Amino acid sequence: MNDHKILLTGDYWHADFQPIVSSFKTPTTLVPIEKIESVSDSTFDLIIIAQARRDQHSQVDVEKLHAIFPTTPVIAVLGSWCEGETRSGKPWPGVTRIYWHQWQGRYQNFIDQLSESGITEWHAPRTSTIGDRIAIPKAVPVGNPISCVAISAWTATRHQMAVAAIHHFGWRSTWIERGVWNAETITAVDAICIEADAWCSEVESRVKWIQSEVPNKPMVLLVNYPRVDQLKAINAAGIAEVVSKPFELVDLQAAIVRAVDSHEVAQPAETEQIAR
């Protein structure tokens, strides 16, 4: 991974992108978009434009990047205020759009594909459609083996939606809800996926009930358009990962794998602290 190089430009100092910037393990060059010519002699494996609000950077800026680095994929990482840009703004044509809450799984997929073959879905022609990009095989996240995921959903329809995704990964599932779940089955699950509309007091109460009934299991929240300012409360409630709807299957799969891996790492540390 350390052999790759990334160029990050745009509004990368905005709060929406600080978790992304701090998470990079790959050598990353940060340059304001108006000074992009200063690195024109360098080579990169990926160029990222951070945009915190709609129409913040122009199509001219994007075309300049493509002209300077014609063979390097250019993608947009977007903040919360860009959610409606496709309807009421001027999204850059031919640029893959990744929202801040989609970043971890999709970036890891890019790194895995790049390491394996040198070509990724972000190398697809600018004329390719969303359908074309989705059709490109995704790298399978590597982590602790997962066999069963418990799903918390208020309706059978929403439960079945999550089941379809979980079974696509080759994992088993069980439904955890008041009066529905089986205690014997729940003890064997590796993670819990909570399906909801938005983070609110009702969902927070559901999380507390799950924790009381099934303690010490990593949890992933599946929710509509999460906001950066909600993350602190969500994490404080014990949620390890957040996935935004609508999502690609790789988003959910990668989030569950990360949640289980982080939980496994945390357990020995917690045990050692208690022993002291």
Image (cartoon, helix red, strand yellow):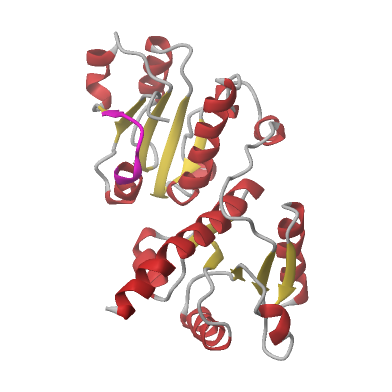
Residue in the image at 62% along x and 21% along y: 127
Residue 243 point in image, percent of width and height: 54, 58
Residue 68 point in image, percent of width and height: 37, 11
Determine whether 225 is above or below 37 in the image.
Answer: below
Q: From the image, which quarter does the N terminus lie in?
A: top left
Q: Is residue 209 left or right of residue 128?
A: left
Q: Is 24 part of what is drawn in magenta?
A: yes
Please give the range of residues in magenta. Answer: 22-29
Q: Is residue 275 left or right of residue 124?
A: left
Residue 175 point in image, percent of width and height: 72, 76
Residue in the image at 36% along x and 39% along y: 51
Res 256 → quadrant: bottom right
Residue 41 point in image, percent of width and height: 29, 8
Residue 103 vs residue 10, the one in the foreground? 103
Residue in the image at 60% along x and 28% along y: 121
Residue 143 vs residue 249, the one in the foreground? 143
Q: From the image, which quarter does the C terminus lie in?
A: bottom left
Q: Is 190 part of what is drawn in magenta?
A: no
- Number of labels in the image equals 0
Q: Is residue 74 visible?
A: yes
Determine whether 205 is above or below 257 in the image.
Answer: below
Q: Is residue 85 visible?
A: no
Determine whether 68 is above or below 265 in the image.
Answer: above
Q: Residue furthest front?
A: 275
Residue 50 vs residue 254, the one in the foreground? 254
Residue 173 vs residue 6, the one in the foreground? 173
Q: Residue furthest top?
A: 41
Q: Is residue 143 left or right of residue 226?
A: right
Res 153 → quadrant: bottom right
Residue in the image at 77% along x and 67% along y: 160
